[in-house]
């Protein structure tokens, strides 16, 4: 039997109506959303299912995304599909921890709610920024970030290693703008500013990580039933004794998604199931290893693909 990986997308793939078909038609999936709603201090169902702009505001996005991903995960599990290894991009790492049994879902919802607030408020609006860089290798991007930091005296670093030829940079807006100029001169096919509320996965969010550490002190992590791959180190993890520390560091450290996928491939994963909204991770896989199949499951209609 093929080894299978469950993978979970991060912030940016959200939309109003995530997992609503499962919520409406499956009592077990509905109970997942109800549990999530009970764990947070806002009307989660309204954010998920009714037209609104708050779903794109970080402090709400992250909790809504995790709830939707857990709801779809429940449907996948009910279909009898299991995984041998799991990982998630940024926020998606929490869904992966739930999927492998290392983190209680209600705990994950409460932590992610705080995480979203802390990340939203860590840097004053307008100070930070992020840009996606297309068409350059990691060494070129890293060198340009160092040069821009030297020139400006400000922070800019690689924040997401998504796949070959796609890296996101993050930091002070002036430094992000400057590194964009340097990367265009170096031959980037595209440098695109992202519509985000802060310089995520950069040292500017260290204060958010410190606040999150205090929340995670009260969370008990269980044993991982299957391994998961950590964003910060791109290492396969079974011992969760360092998981809280890794989640703290993840807030202000680069997400090594390409390296995480390669770790899963080295583990022997032959089939990937992307659980949750969108097809972002399937797109990255085409650039990492086109030969590896990815099944995307957003809702009830997609469950048939698992057959």
Image (spheres, helix red, strand yellow):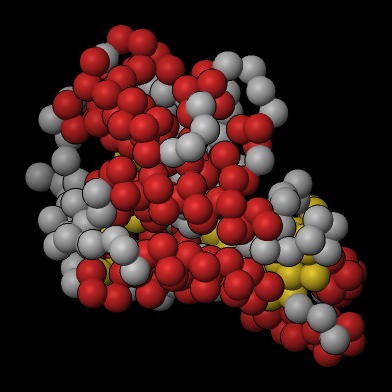
The answer to which of 11 and 217 lies nearer the viewer is 217
The answer to which of 203 and 82 lies nearer the viewer is 203
Task: Name the residue: 64% across, 17% down.
Answer: 51
The answer to which of 236 and 174 lies nearer the viewer is 174
Residue 62 higher or lower than 238, as above or below: above
> On the rendered image, what quadrant is the C terminus found in?
top left
- Image side of residue 155 versus residue 44, left or right: right
Task: Name the residue: 38% across, 74% down.
Answer: 245
Task: Name the residue: 47% across, 22% down.
Answer: 45
Taking the view exactly as shown, the residue that stands out farthest to the left is: 1
- Image side of residue 22 versus residue 50, left or right: left
- Image side of residue 232 versus residue 203, left or right: left
Task: Name the residue: 10% across, 45% down.
Answer: 1
Total marks shown come to 0
Residue 108 % position (x, y): 35, 49
Q: Is residue 268 visible?
A: no
Residue 267 higher or lower than 294, as above or below: below
Residue 220 falls in image quadrant: bottom left
């Amino acid at each position: 039997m093929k080894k299978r990986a469950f993978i979970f997308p991060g912030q940016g793939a959200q939309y109003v109506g995530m997992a609503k078909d499962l919520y409406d038609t499956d009592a077990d999936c509905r109970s997942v959303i109800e549990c999530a709603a009970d764990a947070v201090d806002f009307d989660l169902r309204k954010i998920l299912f009714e037209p609104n702009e708050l779903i794109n505001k970080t402090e709400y996005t992250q909790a809504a995304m995790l709830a939707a991903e857990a709801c779809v995960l429940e449907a996948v599990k009910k279909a009898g599909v299991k995984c041998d290894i799991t990982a998630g991009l940024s926020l998606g790492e929490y869904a992966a921890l739930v999927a492998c049994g290392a983190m209680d879902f209600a705990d994950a919802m409460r932590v992610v709610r705080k995480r979203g607030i802390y990340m939203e408020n860590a840097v004053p609006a307008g100070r930070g920024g992020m840009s996606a860089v297309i068409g350059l290798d990691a060494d070129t991007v890293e060198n340009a970030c160092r040069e821009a930091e030297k020139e400006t005296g400000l922070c800019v670093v690689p924040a997401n290693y998504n796949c070959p030829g796609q890296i996101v940079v993050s930091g002070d807006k002036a430094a992000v703008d400057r590194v964009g100029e340097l990367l265009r001169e170096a031959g980037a096919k595209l440098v695109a500013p992202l519509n985000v509320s802060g310089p995520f996965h950069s040292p500017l969010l260290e204060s958010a990580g410190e606040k999150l550490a205090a929340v995670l002190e009260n969370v008990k992590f269980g044993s991982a039933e299957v391994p998961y791959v950590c964003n910060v180190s791109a290492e396969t993890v079974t011992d969760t004794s360092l998981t809280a520390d890794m989640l703290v560091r993840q807030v202000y450290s680069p997400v090594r998604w390409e390296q995480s996928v390669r770790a899963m491939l080295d583990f022997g994963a032959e089939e990937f199931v992307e659980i949750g909204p969108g097809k972002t991770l399937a797109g990255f896989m085409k650039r990492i290893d086109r030969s590896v199949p990815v099944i995307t499951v957003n809702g009830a209609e997609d469950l048939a693909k698992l057959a």
